[in-house]
Image: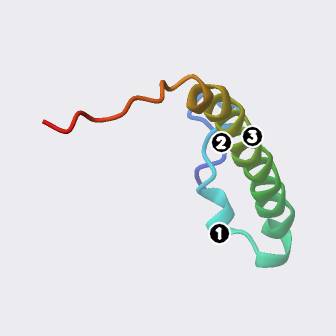
């Protein structure tokens, strides 16, 4: 499992390349956790976008185009 340890002897938690070398059954909990956390992030972003769009759409003035 190269890529997990830093040159100084510590553990590099920001590099997920080691998941490719793991047995798929051992990597599955990591991948499921990543997918679950990203789902929460994207659903929260969608809710915030919708909450921002509703008042913005309400504030758009109702203007008619001229017939010139």
Residue behind mark 3: 47
Q: CA distance from mark 3 to mark 1?
A: 37 Å
Q: Quadrant of the C terminus?
A: top left
| Residue 41 x/y as whole percent | 73, 42
Q: Earlier in the sequence, mark 3 or mark 1?
A: 1
For the residue pair 50 and 3, the one nearer the viewer reads as 50
Q: CA distance from mark 2 to mark 3?
A: 39 Å
Residue behind mark 1: 21
Image position of 38 with respect to 49: above or below: below
2 and 1 marks in contact (CB < 8 Å): no
| Residue 45 x/y as whole percent | 68, 39
* Residue 1 appearing in the image: no
Which secondary structure lies at badge 2? loop
Left or right: residue 60 versus residue 64 is right
Residue behind mark 2: 5
Left or right: residue 65 versus residue 50 is left
For the residue pair 5 and 47, the one nearer the viewer reads as 47
């Amino acid at each position: 499992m190269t890529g997990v340890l830093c040159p100084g002897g510590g553990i590099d938690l920001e590099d997920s390349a080691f998941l490719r070398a793991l047995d798929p059954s051992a990597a599955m909990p990591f991948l499921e956790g990543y997918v679950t956390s990203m789902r929460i992030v994207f659903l929260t972003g969608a809710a915030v976008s919708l909450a921002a769009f509703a008042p913005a759409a309400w504030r758009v003035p109702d203007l008619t185009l001229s017939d010139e």
